[in-house]
Amino acid sequence: MFESLLPAPPDPILGLTEAFKEDPNPAKINLGTGIYTDDNGKTPTLDCISRSEKILAEKSTSGGGYLPMTGLAEYDRSVVELLFGADHEMVQSGRALAAQTPGGTGGLRVAADFIARTNPGAKLWMSNPTWANHNGIFTAAGLELGTYPYYDQESRTLAFDEMVTALKNVPAGDVVLFHACCHNPSGMDPSPAQWEELAELAAAQGFLPLFDFAYQGFGEGLVEDAFGLRAFAAKGIELLVASSFSKNFGLYNQRVGAMTVVAGAAEAAQNAMSHVKLCIRTNYSNPPAHGARLVATVLADAELRTIWEQDVATMRNRINSMRRLFVETMAAKTDKADFSFVATQRGMFSFSGLSKEQVLEIREKHSVYIVGSGRISIAGITSANIEPLCNALASVL
């Protein structure tokens, strides 16, 4: 059976990382994978995590049996408090319940299976463009997919009017996927006023919003980045949220995420979570413990939480400073393209506007690795590689 199999195509992002590793060029630059690096090109262990590790070591919490299907209870509580605020009525009443998942990707897959189980026939609508793995996750769960306009490639702006027009045609009961902040891959987010308009539209249309919230704190701030999510919650409508702590805690390999259900009443939330549990049981049964314990320890300790918030601000500020430096450097290198739009975007990513041919050329000639769509990971730019990067880009424009 296996002898007749042809090789599967490589993942467009992770496959790029493999190619980067095999490149012998010592000056190679990886701007494909969404991993934060400091100005030395290293992915740091946050100070709050180092301290949390010591606390857990003293408690000897590494042993024990399985976690519940929904994971660590104190972690789940921390998730909903971070999403909506500890004093929010939904959190206090139990209308918002979280289940720990293996990363944000795990949260999305659980959400997909939950939708397929409880609302068979529902169509899921994604932004055009969206994260490359969204299509695969929801297709694997058996969902029918559609897209709505989001990003205008020519003007490098949010195609908001076209987006609203399309969403007005989404039937009640269908699901619409939103990026809560730091849209991947475009870096363009709705304004607060636009989020309010989208929330009103969701309430009027009756579709189910599903938020992918992978970058909380990397846009404007931990509270500010939750504005869209909270605007929808204020309408009293049902929500699903897939969230991740890979980026804002630097816990990429611990796979720490969640899937949160928001219902109109606590009993309805509990009923929904019973179906979520069945989806979890047939996927991975229960999540790993260590990463969740690290996060829960930090968020429960006032001092550690303050340190964490400072760490998130440091990462956010570095990314934004690299955006500005990139714009300034490219302006000095060439007049063939205007990259000023990069400074208006938020989060780890930006569309460069490069064609697939140009992306391949800078990879082959300069060992600069960018996803075929032209998406650049701004978090991979450093003060050391900015000059060779911009020289390479200028050479293909």
Image: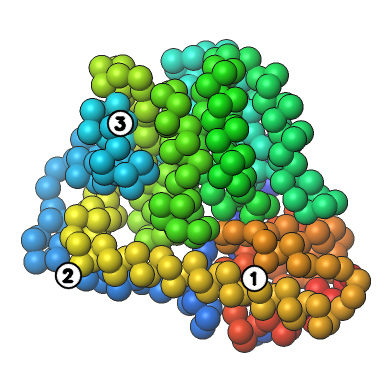
Q: Nearer the viewer, residue 82 or 294?
A: 82
- CB atoms of marks 3 and 2 within 8 Å: no
The spot of residue 36 in percent (x, y) is 50, 67
Q: Report helix, strand or loop for mark 3.
A: helix
User: SS for tag 2?
Assistant: helix
Q: Give the residue pinned by disc 2.
A: 54
| Residue 291 location, quadrant | bottom left
Q: Which mark is residue 90?
A: 3
Judged by depth in the image, the label closer to the viewer, 3 or 1, is 3
Nearer to me, 130 or 360: 130
Q: Amino acid at mark 2?
A: Lys
**Residue 323: mark:** 1
Neighbor class of circle 3 (other Cα within 10 Å; few <14, some 14-19, many 20+) is many
Which mark sits nearer the N-terminus, 3 or 1?
A: 3
1 vs 2, front mark: 1
**Residue 15 on image: x %, y %:** 63, 57
- Residue 128 lies in what quarter of the image? top right
Give the side of residue 304 with respect to residue 31, left or right. left
**Figure quadrant of the N terminus:** top right
Which amino acid, by three-letter code, is at mark 1?
Arg
Residue drawn at x 14%, y 43% is 65
Classify 10 Å Cα crowding around label 2: few (below 14), some (14-19), many (20 and above). Answer: few
Residue at 76% across, 67% down: 340
Gap between marks 1 and 2 measured at Cα: 35 Å
Chain-order first, disc 1 or disc 2: 2
At label 3, the amino acid type is Met
The mark that comes first in sequence, 3 or 2, is: 2
> Relative to 22, does residue 32 appear above or below in the rendering?
above
Say if 196 sits above or below 30 in the image.
Answer: above
The residue under the point 9% across, 60% down is: 60
